[in-house]
Amino acid sequence: MYELSQQVLRTDISGMPLEWIGYQAAVRLLHLGQIAYACGPRLYRIHGGINYRTGRQSVADIEAIIATRGQNLAVEKRGKDYTPPLNNQALFKRDAHLCLYCGKQFMARELSRDHVTPLTYGGTEAWNNVVAACKRCNNHKADRTPEAAGMELLAIPFTPTHAEYVYLQGKRILADQMEFLLAHFPRSSPLHERLARASAIQAESADALRA
């Protein structure tokens, strides 16, 4: 069994990722009859009250991924014009905690948000104009464009789709949940390459520690 802080991935009935929810919300959906089907490993077995007549205790099993019936505002977010809210946590995860100038991987506290085109030059506070940058590179770039600072931007910033944003909001994502989410990323999503690159860096670091 998993810790009660482990998140459940909720989807619509077609399997489109919607959001992360806690076990309490998942149990509520189960008892309301809103869960159409579930997949992945069982995260929790929640024991409820004892039935006065039968003497049996209610039990709720919650899997890693649950598909729910009915409409939800989150479905609307998949629309063509939807732009997920920008925040540093999601931004740094979008860029796989890599500085997109020096290419090294950092902890979140060592990264900062850099505006590729500075705000003073007409740049916007938008996904397609911001990247993760280590503080050293950000300080060196200062209030300049990468070209003016003599720096190379290693990847083009992009606005995540709703499915990608659900991934970016996840805390501890299980293998089954990650596989499910990846299947809903666009084939051209830069996240495929960034995740692979981050995994390679982590593997190299682990090998270096063992050496």
Image (cartoon, grey):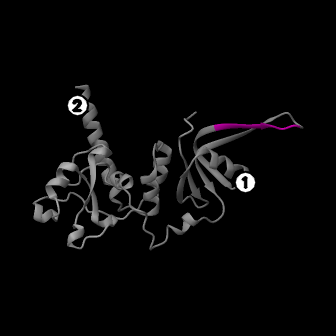
Q: Which residue is situated farthest in the right direction here?
A: 53
Q: Which residue is mark 2?
A: 208
Task: Measuring from the top left, give residue 34's x and y in whole percent.
Answer: 69, 56
Q: Which residues are magenta?
A: 45-52
User: Which quarter of the figure is the N terminus placed in?
Assistant: top right
Secondary structure beneath dot 1 equals: loop
Indicate the quadrant where residue 138 lies: bottom left
Say which quarter of the image contains residue 202: top left
Question: Which element carries disc 2, helix, strand or loop?
Answer: helix
Q: Amino acid at mark 2?
A: Ala
Question: Which of the two discs, 2 and 1, labels the residue nearer the N terminus?
Answer: 1
Q: Which mark is residue 32?
A: 1
- The residue shown at (26%, 41%) is 201
Q: Is residue 137 left or right of residue 68?
A: left
Q: Position of residue 22 (x, y in %)?
A: 58, 46
| Mark in front: 2 vs 1 | 1
